[in-house]
């Protein structure tokens, strides 16, 4: 598993220049018009769900990447601290956030936040680090703090790797290099049940066309 996590970290560092192409469905990620419309409809659903939580106060974003969601958060929050392991992705993120280079699996916050947010990250957390990750979230939340997440839905067919086995996939870059990563697509009810014993009550749902899982809640 250590090797897979190392590959995963390197994959997202090397993928930084093309990551936004995936989100915007450009180049090799392009979709047919009908499929593209369904993709953007689901993206709008997830963004609207986040906007309903505003104002967000002080936000901690974990595994912030190139800033697709960071840029949405800074419009809704008083302050955003965005943590990511790779300088390559942080270099593309927004200077409107406080950018912190740190491995989420090793970093601990020195303060608490009103909201902890993470997008397309939980599906990359292996079972062996799952409880540890949620302990980090618990530590980062102030009184009355909330959690919100966006991730790949179980019905997502627009973002899959090859050679899928268990909770792992092989992903490729545009230059043909391949990397092994963790990828677990959670069903809403399954995830809600999984985190309840860890002290979280989450309301989660798949977006209408199945691309994304989104929602959140509070520490119980």
Image (cartoon, rainbow, N blue to C red):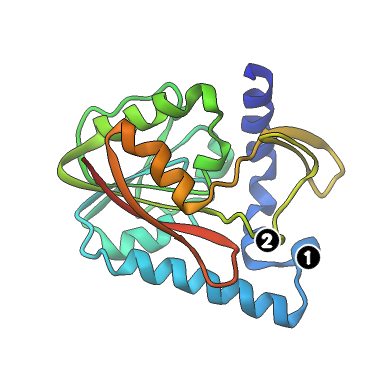
Q: Is residue 49 above or below residue 181?
A: below
Residue in view at x 62 percent, y 76 percent: 38
Q: Is residue 216 above or below residue 109?
A: below
Q: Are marks 1 and 2 in contact (CB under 8 Å)?
A: yes
Residue position for label 2: 21
Disc sitting over residue 137 in the figure: none
175, 212: nearer the viewer: 212
Residue position for label 1: 27
Q: Is residue 155 above or below residue 85?
A: below
Residue in view at x 59 percent, y 46 percent: 185
Q: Residue 92's spot in the image, x, y percent?
A: 54, 50
Residue in view at x 39 percent, y 63 percent: 72
Quarter residue 21 falls in: bottom right
Q: Earlier in the sequence, mark 1 or mark 2?
A: 2
Q: CA distance from mark 1 to mark 2?
A: 7 Å
Q: Residue furthest left?
A: 143
Residue in view at x 54 percent, y 72 percent: 208
Quadrant holding the C terminus: top left
Viewed as shown, does residue 9 lie left or right of 70? right
Quarter residue 162 falls in: top right
Q: Residue 175's spot in the image, x, y percent?
A: 85, 45
Viewed as shown, does residue 116 lie left or right of 131? left
């Amino acid at each position: 598993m250590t090797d897979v996590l190392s590959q995963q970290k390197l994959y997202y560092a090397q993928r930084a220049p093309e990551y936004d192409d995936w989100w915007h469905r450009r180049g090799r990620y392009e979709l047919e018009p009908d499929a593209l419309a369904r993709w953007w409809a689901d993206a709008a659903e997830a963004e609207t769900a986040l906007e309903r939580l505003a104002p967000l106060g002080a936000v901690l974003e974990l595994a912030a990447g190139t800033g697709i969601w960071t840029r949405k958060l800074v419009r809704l929050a008083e302050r955003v601290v965005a943590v990511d392991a790779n300088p390559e992705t942080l270099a593309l993120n927004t200077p409107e956030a406080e950018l912190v280079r740190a491995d989420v699996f090793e970093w601990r916050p020195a303060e608490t936040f009103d909201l902890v947010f993470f997008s397309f990250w939980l599906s990359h957390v292996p079972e062996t680090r799952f409880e540890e990750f949620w302990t980090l979230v618990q530590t980062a939340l102030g009184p009355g703090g909330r959690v919100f997440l966006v991730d790949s839905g179980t019905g997502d067919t627009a973002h899959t790797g090859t050679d899928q086995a268990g909770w792992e996939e092989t992903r490729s870059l545009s230059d043909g290099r391949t990397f092994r990563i963790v990828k677990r697509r959670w069903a809403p009810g399954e995830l809600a049940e999984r985190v309840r014993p860890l002290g979280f009550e989450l309301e989660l749902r798949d977006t209408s066309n199945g691309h994304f899982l989104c929602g959140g809640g509070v520490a119980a």
